[in-house]
Amino acid sequence: MSTQKAATTSDIIKFVTAQLEQAADPSKAPEMAAYMKTDMPFYGVQKPDREPILRAIKKVYRPKDRREYEATIRQLWNLHHREEKYIALGYATIFVDLAAPGTLDLFEELVRDGAWWDFVDVIASHLVGHLLKSHRAEISPIMDVWVDDEDVWIRRTAILSQLKHKKNTDSKRLFSYCLKRADEKEFFIRKAIGWALREYSYANPEAVHRFIVKNKDRLSGLSVREGAKQLVKAGWTV
């Protein structure tokens, strides 16, 4: 028998805030805020202590449809503490099968509002990445626009959007994004290029090796080091 039950968005909000308040450790909050370089308040609930909350949500609070899914993400995201936003992204990831191409507008809002790696990397790899893989024909042209966006976090999202695609990666598009942004000085873009190449190298080391060797003079040293990390471990010369 399923343990899931009909629950309103307000039920989930009450559950999440109550659980975070119960698990709160105020002594950890300043250190967590300092690490994330943010003034946003923390409860002081680290990731291992947030996992039981997400497991309970998965077990009990599945949304009935896409509208409820998106509404709950928004309401969790709009709460005051950073951990509540982490739960919002965890919830979004758990039930990402309810996302549709139109949900990309919400994910874009979260990227632009979150504007830091701890939020953006989850959104890019688990949420936008899922939509791209499931609806490639519709989402790919949007990523082609995002990679040139003036917002660094939108550009980073486009580069990282295939991070989990493995052998299903559109290598032509990935490599073109890396070259489009190769001249950037921005650390988070250079790092994203390297990370995307490194992840793809697990699935297609030959293609990544050829790309890095051919474009070594165009890519930043950081991108090359990060992108070639797994290749070098495996004995490739870059």
Image (tube, helix red, strand yellow):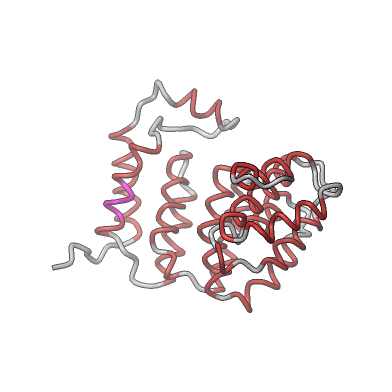
Total number of numbered discs in the rendering: 0
Residue at the image position 29 percent from the left and 44 percent from the top: 52
The answer to whether residue 54 is magenta is: yes
In the picture shown, does residue 53 fall above or below 149? above
Residue at the outermost left position = 1
Which quadrant of the figure has residue 109?
bottom right
Residue at the image position 22 percent from the left and 64 percent from the top: 4
In the picture shown, does residue 159 fall above or below 25? below
The magenta region covers 53-57
Residue at the outermost bottom position = 137
Q: Quadrant of the N terminus?
A: bottom left
Task: Please name whichever residue, 80 or 182, is drawn nearer the observer in this view of the structure.
Answer: 182
Task: Give residue 141's position: percent from left, percent from top.
Answer: 70, 73
Q: Quadrant of the C terminus?
A: top right
Task: Give residue 107's position: percent from left, percent from top.
Answer: 56, 60
Task: Give residue 129's position: percent from left, percent from top.
Answer: 56, 62
Residue at the image position 52 percent from the left and 65 percent from the top: 130
The answer to whether residue 219 is magenta is: no
Q: Main secondary structure of the magenta part?
A: helix
Q: Is residue 59 left or right of residue 166?
A: left
Q: Is residue 175 left or right of residue 131?
A: right
Q: Is residue 172 left or right of residue 5?
A: right
